[in-house]
Image: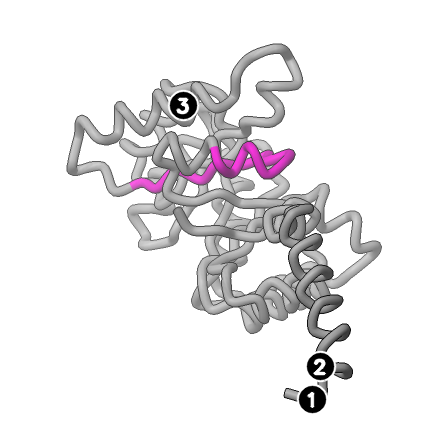
Amino acid sequence: MRLFLDTANLEHIRHGARLGVISGVTTNPSLVSKEGKVNYKKLVQEICSIVPGPVSTEVISQDTAGMLAEAREIAKWAKNVVVKIPAGLEGTEATAALAGEGIKVNYTLCFSVNQAILAARAGAAYVSPFVGRLDDIGEDGMLLIQDLIQVYREYPEIKTEAIAASIRHPQHCLAAARAGAHIATVPYAVLLQMAKHPLTDTGISRFAADWQKVMGDVKNI
């Protein structure tokens, strides 16, 4: 399972890139708005220059014509841009048209296997099931990942990749990997949590203390 970073914060993206574990980025209007009033195009282009893999950025329009106009413009911003199109009738129509033009689409805000099937048949490069938001309403979001992966595997001609989105904690990442998600897109805080374990910290401190007792300064290596 590959890891994307779900953010529009350039500092966090640079750090993720330095770690060498992030192969793409996903953004949305809410994440971009957290960065304050910015030049949207320049921000996306900067992200694309940091991360060589796919960078998903979302349209704002809610009608098919508007989605298509925005998507076609966004697709010009960088070679690794992927346009996020929301699920629904308008989004499905837009996805099919864009896929026909060779523009990669991330079919987002997916909450059912039926929507995931439409994404695949419309030609989306990616589909983003929002597991955390399903959990918020009392459903098990990871069951959606499991079900759609099972369906996709029944049809080898489907090339759409599933991105486990709306990840809330490291256990979501583990569950997504077990379910067979192709990608998990994680907030920066979750990425940091994935690298941490109290026993790792305790072990490092203990090794350092034992070395100090016998060998002195760490420079004496």
In the rendered structure, the answer to whether residue 197 lies left or right of residue 53 reads: right
Q: Is residue 32 visible?
A: yes
Residue 180 in the image: state x and y as whole percent.
35, 35
**Alpha carbon distance from label 1 to label 2:** 7 Å
Residue under numbered circle 1 = 220
Q: Residue furthest front?
A: 214
**Alpha carbon distance from label 2 to label 3:** 62 Å
**Label located before the other in sequence (1 or 2):** 2
**Label located before the other in sequence (2 or 3):** 3
Mark 1: few, some, or many residues within 10 Å (few <14, many ≥20)?
Answer: few
Mark 3: few, some, or many residues within 10 Å (few <14, many ≥20)?
Answer: many
**What element does badge 1 sit on?**
loop
Above or below residue 138? Residue 135 is below
Relative depth, front residue between 36 and 92: 36
Residue type highlighted by circle 3: Gln
Q: Is residue 97 visible?
A: no
Relative depth, front residue between 1 and 202: 202
In the rendered structure, the answer to whether residue 157 lies left or right of residue 75 reads: left
Relative depth, front residue between 59 and 81: 81
Say whether marks 3 and 1 touch (CB < 8 Å).
Answer: no
Residue under numbered circle 2 = 215
Residue type highlighted by circle 2: Met
In the rendered structure, the answer to whether residue 192 lies left or right of residue 55 reads: right
Residue under numbered circle 3 = 115
Q: Which residues are magenta?
A: 160-174
Residue at 49% from the left image edge and 57% from the top image edge: 24
Above or below residue 197? Residue 113 is above
Residue 208 sits in quarter: bottom right
Residue at 52% from the left image edge and 52% from the top image edge: 4
Say whether marks 1 and 2 touch (CB < 8 Å).
Answer: yes
